[in-house]
Image (spheres, grey):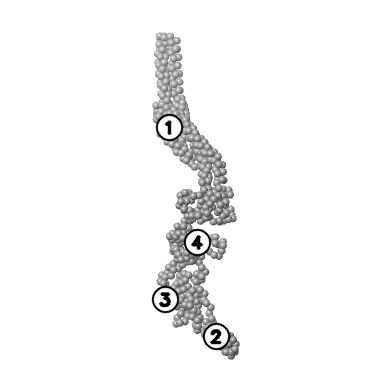
Amino acid sequence: METEAHAADPISNRKTTNNGFAKIIAFVALIAIAFLTWQWLSQSGSVSIERTTAKVTRGDLTILVLEGGNLRALESLELKSQVETRDGAKILSIVDEGYEVTAKDVEEKKVLIKLDPTEIKERIEAHDIEYENAQGAMTEADEARAIQSTESEKEIKVARQAVRFALLDFEKYLGEGISVKVLSQRNLPDDEDPLAAYEAKYRERLTAGLQKDEEATGEEIQTANRDVIIERGNWERVDFAKYLEEDNLGDGEAQQEWRKRQDALLVATSESAVELENVLGSERLAKREFIAKATLDKQRVALKKAQLAELSAQTSLSLFRRYEFPKNAEEFLTKYEDALHALDREKTEALAKLSQAEAKFRNMEQLFKLAEKRRTDLATQLESCNIIATEPGLVVYGSSERNPYFGGNEAKIEEGASVRFKQTMITIPDMRRMGVKVSIQESQIKKVKVGQKARIVADAEPDKTLTGVVKKVALLPDSNRWYENPNQKVYPTEVDVDGTHDWLKPGMSVKLEIITDELKDVIKIPLQCVMVDRAETVVYAKRDGKPFRQVVETGGFNDEFIEIASGVKEGEVVFLSKPFVENETNKRTTPAKKTEAAETTAAK
């Protein structure tokens, strides 16, 4: 009915339409006036719009380096394959990933992984023959060494006895006094004690030779023993005759022989004198014809015999002094020296034989030890086919990573897969001690030092803030990241989480704030207030109700605030972005660039 009323009153309808149109015209006019006014004020340089502002404050400023990273256990038990096979050990069974190993599992020695032992058992059976052969060869070499030692000792004993007999024969012939003088002149041992010392030098050499690590030939040992052979002096000929002339012989066989021949000469001389007296007496009696001529001739023959006997005794004594005595003494001395040489030679040969026997034994012993070690290794590998629980914790499978030896990616850890020697199959992290590993940008790494405090917030628990400390900062950039992006250099940094937190799990994403510095009682403003304008660091302060371009000196900063060392005072108001300033330019200015610090923070 109302519609019908309007339709019936066309004059009233026109009035309503005209009023709406008038309102639209007035609104458009108002916008136009405002636009013209803004243009005029902009061109004249006066402020028309006031931007958002902030107040200059004083307080503490914490300087931070912000990065994202992942949690990891500081210590983990890695269960690796200890089985060496040609194509890898096959996994027969393995516990599920995420299985919680309990203290009861550790006590009962629960098997976490079982590897196929077939190839290891076959190698153990084949190695048993090699082990037994090596053991038999070592035993044989040990027995041969013992036999050689006994034979060498026997031969040395015979040679030592020959030396003593030769020394006794020499002393027996010359007498103790003269023999000591002669042996001293020739630098030879003259009784039991020096002879024992002479042999002791060879025993020392023998012991030293047997203690050598490497086998030595007989020629090498003989050469090495030359320095312990007793010097024989200058080997000048001994004048034994002078001992007879000086009547200085000892009570020996030579002295007895010398006296015997002297006595024979004395008897012959006496008999010759008696016969001579008899002949002279008989000649006087024969002149008086008291005796027959035949009796005189008989006595003259007896005198001739006596004279010949005296001459023979004189010759025998002279020959003994000039020839027989020196010859016999030299022979006894030579026999003694030869016996000493034979003893030297016997000891050297014994040392060479013993060294060779010892070297052979050591070789066999080394081969046996290698075979024994190999046998132990195989037994250990067989035992390692069953990997049991040793510590409680959460089971995490080893990740499939690139094999540096054979190329390509390693097989996924699962039943039926083959694992290489030393490949990690299971990791059980110790979640009582956790840490964060992050990569710090090259522009920020110089701020980060070992020992600095850190705040950690896990993405899964944003309302919980943890604390930590920087434990390690790399000296060189991460080479793996260099291959991905050569222009980006990052430094691996490790932070330890303080305390123990049951809800933390390895691999959780976290945000890390490293506190590099804490400034006390400094002037600070929001980071976006600082700008770079015409190569100067400036802020726009509100003074006398208008923006004022002020050059400032900045200090440390974080992602929110920056320190102002000079330029503005506490309590002043500054603009968060660049406004339009009187007398700065006749044209509309563009927003200034942020400071380098602000750009660095924004880049992060």
In the rendering, which numbered label is found on residue 570? 3
Q: Is residue 295 above or below residue 440?
A: above
Q: Residue furthest front?
A: 1
Horizontal and vertical percent for residue 460? Answer: 49, 64
- The Cα–Cα distance between marks 3 and 1, rounded to whole angstroms, is 115 Å
Between disc 3 and disc 2, the foreground one is 2
**Which structural element holds mark 1?**
helix
Earlier sequence position, callout 1 versus callout 4: 1
- Tally the marks: 4
Residue 78 as seen in the image, left or right of residue 522: right
Between disc 1 and disc 4, the foreground one is 4
The quarter holding residue 13 reads: bottom right
- CB contact under 8 Å: marks 3 and 4: no
Earlier sequence position, callout 3 versus callout 4: 4
**Which structural element holds mark 2?**
helix
- Report whether residue 468 is seen: yes
Between disc 3 and disc 4, the foreground one is 4
* Residue drawn at 48 percent across, 66 percent down: 66
Q: Which amino acid does label 4 sit on?
A: Met
Earlier sequence position, callout 4 versus callout 2: 2
Q: What residue type is labelled 2?
A: Phe
Earlier sequence position, callout 3 versus callout 2: 2
Horizontal and vertical percent for residue 196? Answer: 42, 34
Q: What residue type is labelled 1?
A: Val
The residue under label 4 is 508
